[in-house]
Amino acid sequence: MGPAPAKTKLRVAAGELEVMESALKVTGKEGKKQSSKSHTVAESPVEGLLKPVKLSQAELYKEPTSEELNRLRETESLFHSSLLRLQVEELLKEVRLSEKKKERIDAFLQEVNQRIMRVPSTPETELTDQAWLPAGVRVPLHQVPYTVKGCFRFLPPAQVTVVGSYLLGTCIRPDINVDIALTMPREILQDKDGLNQRYFRKRALYLAHLAHHLAQDPLFGSVRFSYTNGCHLKPSLLLRPYGKDERLVTVRLHPCPPPDFFRLCRLLPSKNNVRSAWYRGHSPPGDGSSEPPTPHYNTWILQDTALESHVQLLSTVLGSALGLKDGVALLKVWLRQRELDKGLGGFSGFLVSMLVAFLVSTRKIHTTMSGYQVLRSVLQFLATTDLTVNGINLCLSSDPSLPALADFHQTFPVVFLDSSGHLNLCADVTASTYHQVQHEARLSMMLLDSKAEDGFQLLLMTPKPMIRAFDHILHLCPLSRLQAACHRLKLWPELQDNGGDYVSAALGPLTTLLEQGLGSRLQLLAHSRPPVSEWAISQDPPKHRESGTLTLGLLLRPEGLTSVLELGPEADQPEAADFRQFWGSRSELRRFQDGAIREAVVWEAVSMSQKRLIPHQVVTHLLSIHADIPDTCVHYMGGLLDALIQGLKETSSTGEEALAAVVRCYDDLSRLLWGLEGLPLTVSAVQGAHPALRYTEVFPPTPVWPAYSFHEHLRERASLLPRPDKPCPAYVEPMTVVCHLEGSGQWPQDAEAIRRVRAAFQLRLAELLTQQHGLQCRATATHTDVLKDGFVFRIRVAYQREPQILKEMRSPEGMISLRDTPASFRLEKDTRHLPLLTSALHGLQQQHPAFSGVARLTKRWVRAQLLGEGFTDESLDLVAAALFLHPEPFTPPSSPQVGFLRFLFLVSTFDWKNNPLIVNLNNELTVEEQVEIRSGFLATRVQLPVMVIITPQDRKSSVWTQDGPSPQILQQLVVLAAEALPVLEKQLMDPRGPGDIRTVFRPPLDMYDVLIRLSPRHIPRHRQAVDSPAASFCRGLLSEPGPSSLMPVLGYDPPQLYLAQLRKAFGELALFFYDQHGGEVIGVLWNPTSFRPQPFKASNTKGHMVVSQGGESVMVPNIEAILEDFAILGEGLVQAVEARSERWTV
């Protein structure tokens, strides 16, 4: 059974299906009526379909007003299209806070201020004497070590100030947070409070006393602790209103010291403020002057001292410049969609605001710019500026006593100094996070420069969770292992600096280690930031190991991914020792073909799927030898879905090698065809037209050598027949190859004559291949089957003018006109479109090795949902190709797993009703041509199929979806994809392991009215089922060719033949659904219209019975007889017919 949530959703969707179907089935007559009434403003014939607004003559030629002219000028200079301006304005309306809510928040803030000022004082006690704290509140800080000097008393704050984005008008929904700085009175603090966490202890006690008193106030619905930006030394107090406004706002209280209390020279990044003797219990070895610096500790104190000055700076810069505020809001949305703004070391909205202030100060942004221009300017700056190499500085002073940028670069990976010149705003941002921001900014700039119509949607409305953005994901769990990693990596100074937070201390060294090891395989390594947790005031703060899981995302380079060799320096080079030390036991000396003897590391990988997972071997090996993290603590999510496209015996391969063998055999055959002697006309082209020849066959064909004992032998035809007393033989599908012959004046001009000439060519082809190359052939009037190396190819001879001749219509007057006919359309599709598509997708596979795996997984999933009949192979291949040709806002997938997740997202979110899916193969379509295609699509939408896929060779008609899917089937696919995506993502992001990864591939059977269960004995592809059986029947295959191989039985699949009979006999009464890859169940859905009583007609009695209703004889379906017919038609194949009568009534 499928995922439980899908069951309820599918029933809800039934109504949507009918609406969609009725909407898109507009009869030709209706269409003609509407087109004839060109003067009236008619409503759109299709509900929900986008139509241009029709204006009267007077409105059309009315002069624009001055306001409209100004707006047009602004749009031209500030935005690159009117549509983009409208989209940006709508988004800003959505994320902005309404005036009514602002008033309610302001009133709440007034109350908060009054309550804080009324909290009573406490007498002075030692910092370690905390007996005065009430029983219901705990100190929100890990006090390790507990002993510390100093005294504390509580006094109401000297000043209460609103700081942050709420005051500036740049906060965005849905999470409205208001930050309030509480300036602690000088009497509480002492001169040396900067040392040994004394200031942070006082800050935590201050909050604990506040929390106890505010929690008793009925004004607050919840009073909880949290960490400020995830920093464990800096808790904050969260206040939320009581009642219906509980979700309106969260007020965050941040105690801070009075201005100028701490001397800035004591908080430079090179200074130490946490003594080793206090923190570790003993002094560092040496003369006592070698105390390690505590740059992060110093920065966290500086952040508190600068809260108000930062707000004043931003208020001055942003002021009344609405464009700048809009730009900051857009940038915050951009960061949130990419999950870059949360947790310790996130690239927060505050950093972006300060970056805008910096760009204004350097005149790269002007205050008159629009929000879109600000967004673009900031992204351009981020894309082209590496703050890990060249830091930036908001300080304009030339005071020589200020520390230099170089001093900060020695200590911090990313440098951006504030206006004081002492505080690095990016102190907590790791190099990995900044490189991820840079990477995203580059992708966004490419998207904006392409001026794509859906650029806004892709840039600001498409979420990019880590699981969908990165090729491989790995979870380090439990986090307590990082404590051992800190010991192994000798990170005592970092632990001292981070207040014992071993996750933050180990993060930088670990990412650097993995980046070095993965080398050319890696494009980008990113890490999750532990989420900012909340906890009740009566609980102890969460421990470091309780901050979730550390997740790393690997974005891989396809060109370097499959190399099994890490080449090191020559043995006599000094670098060789470093190489050996880095790779440990994996490093070995090897002699290469050029005679060089070098250090090298060789990874065990034979198949393409194993090579894709070499990063797994690299990561586990390096973490084990350098960080003491065993492979049991590394949960790697890279190839978990591979099992679903593995063959029967190939548990280590996902079939790329088998497909390559098929293509090699096809290449050999095409060379034989080119070189044939004795054909009346020479071969002008040989083109593959089968999914296996474009690497997208779900289960690749394998060489077939049938066992004669399983078959009856027809000697006169040199053929085999299945024996009824044996299980069904293996399924063999011939691979279609189109063989074009050269043009000649001798070709007839009559369609029937051409068919006969082609039949003669098919016979001659079989004859020559047998004579000249000894191949087993079987010719028919339409094709020639050729057995070569165990593979069967079906060669179809094609004449290039035949489709045109089939289109010719002769009028009674003798005039010839061209008109598409079903026969010409089918022939053109098979002999022209299909070979071109196969060739283009074959080329795509050479560029993107993951394409094969993604396309095959998508088809496996669609067919597993019993929807395979509704979608052609080619349509699903093109949807998969779109993920590589138009990956925005992502990069092209380098693993089947991430490609499949993106397929589910694309199918479930794409607006199939109002947009064509344009797949720009070989980049042949220009931007202008794509705009023209979209315009033409809207004009002819009613005549087009429900799912429209456009390619450069098929710009109008969507040939691959003409026969399906129907509106109901497409809607069903959309619903199932929307259900499967969160289930699968949750499984892959679960650090405890994904559980049963096949869950989303199992179809939900509870939606069907009847289930027909089949006997596995007669299912030839039984072993390909989602839940592959432990044992199945022998299918009569030999492991190697016999003395004289005969042509195997082709295309024999009893369930498919049975389905064809069912559809022919009962197609008007029901729909039939089946998974061709080993499905044991056929799902039947009754057609609702067939259950309506109909007047008695002798010609319409099939499957019906006569009943009396209201004194009249009417006909209704005879369900019992139909179910009996299901069993009779499938005698020997059908095990049981399960009627689910609770789902339907006659």
Image (cartoon, rainbow, N blue to C red):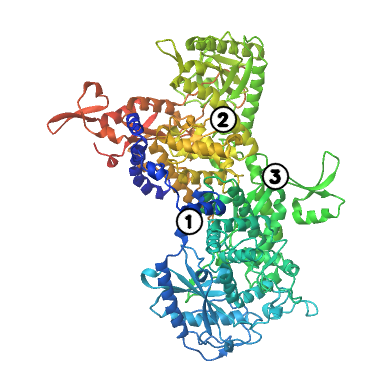
Residue pushed farthest left?
Answer: 1111
Q: Residue 403, position in %: x, y?
A: 74, 73
Q: Amino acid at mark 3?
A: Gly
State how far apart marks 1 and 3 are (Cα). 43 Å
CA distance separating discs 1 and 2: 41 Å
Q: Is residue 247 visible?
A: no
Residue flagged by tag 1: what amino acid is it? Glu
Residue 1069 figure quarter: top left
Mark 3 lies on residue: 560
Q: Tag 2's secondary structure?
A: helix
- The residue that disc 1 covers is 89
For the point 55% across and 66% down, the residue is 546
Question: Tag 3 or tag 1, which sits nearer the N-term?
Answer: 1
Q: Is residue 55 left or right of residue 896?
A: left
Asked if marks 1 and 3 touch (Cβ < 8 Å), the reply is no
- Picture coordinates of residue 207 (x, y %)? 52, 80
How many C-alpha atoms fall within 10 Å of the one at disc 3: few (<14), some, or many (≥20)?
Answer: some
Residue farthest bottom in this picture:
123
